[in-house]
Amino acid sequence: MKKHQKKLLVALPLVAAMSLVGCKNMSVDDLTSLGMKGLKAATLSDNDVKELSKQSCAEMDAQSKIAPAKSAYTKRLNKIAKALGNNLDGTPINYKVYITKDVNAWAMANGCVRVYSGLMDMMTDNEIQGVLGHELGHVALGHSKKAIQVAYATEIARDAAAASSNAQIASLSKSSLGALASAVINSQFSQKQEQDADNYSFDFLVKKKINPAGLATAFDKLGGGDSSILSSHPSSSDRAKNIRKKIAELKK
């Protein structure tokens, strides 16, 4: 498929979103600006994605209670992260803990990795390493980039709904950055993307000489849910079974 055809296919959902929010009160200049931003969303470069991720992560940090450096949570995560390394394909990784009962962890394209204390309370160090390997897999495999493209296009469409004939489409506000971050964090990846991220984590852990069994037992504990690591497609039991099969093959 030619490059311009790919761009067109990626941009089509944005056009549909624009029609849903309505553009009749917008001037030609406004529509032109929106169209250019829409194209930008569809063709975000790696640097664009990292910058948006950086801003979104900063907004999430501002909205969350971060465990201080002397916290037992932070010390524990630093120990866990040491084995994983602080660099992913040339991108420095920054680890922090959010103090919350929620069970989650996520990673963004700029190397922002956040682990919730609720997850740490229910898992061993090895299980957390498996979960983080999975989240880093979404970044390394480009899933996070696609998620932020879709989320960014959605925010542009919302800008269109709020714009008047005399208004210029502004840069993303703090609330929009927060919405963008939430959309990326809660992205529902496809079954193939989840399986690929699981397999990435397995290979990543083996390469780092970390026991991959923690990834399987992590899935045993998670059991399904709404966020990326709790995705019910495929089921947690099937995902754990897949990892155990790979471990058995590794031992042959």
Image (tube, rainbow, N blue to C red):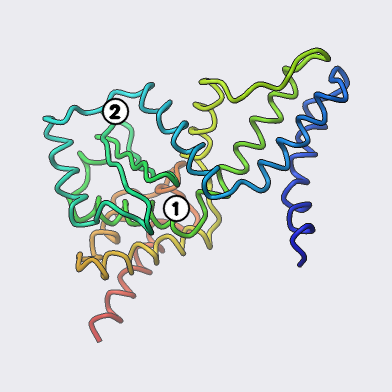
The N terminus - image quarter: bottom right
Left or right for 109, reference 70: right
Q: Quadrant of residue 162?
A: top right
Q: Position of residue 233 (x, y in %)?
A: 50, 55
Check contact, mark 1 vs mark 2: CB within 8 A: no
Q: The C terminus is located in which quarter?
A: bottom left
- Name the residue located 23 percent from the left edge and 54 percent from the top edge: 127
Q: Is residue 150 left or right of residue 77?
A: right
The residue tagged with tag 2: helix, strand or loop? loop
Mark in the foreground, 1 or 2 = 1
Task: From the image, tell me which residue sits under label 2.
Answer: 100
| Residue drawn at the location 27% of the way across and 64% of the way down | 205
SS of the residue under disc 1: helix
> How crowded is the residue under tag 1: few (<14 C-alpha within 10 Å), some, or many (20+)?
many
Which image quadrant is residue 66 in? top left
Most distant residue in the bottom direction? 252
Q: Amino acid at mark 1?
A: Val
Q: What's the mark number on residue 139?
A: 1
Residue 92, labelled with which disc? none
Question: How many labels were placed on the picture?
Answer: 2
- Horizontal arrangement in the rendering, residue 69 relative to residue 201 (left or right): left
Residue 4 sits above or below residue 154 on the image: below
Upstream in sequence: badge 1 or badge 2: 2
Estimate the x, y position of residue 170 in percent, counting from the top left. Answer: 66, 21
Q: Nearer the viewer, residue 154 or 168?
A: 168
- Given residues 96 and 100, the one toward you in this image is 96
Bin the neighbour count of mark 2 within 10 Å (Cα to Cα): few under 14, some 14-19, many 20 and up.
some
Apparent side of residue 74 relative to residue 234 in the rendered image (left or right): left
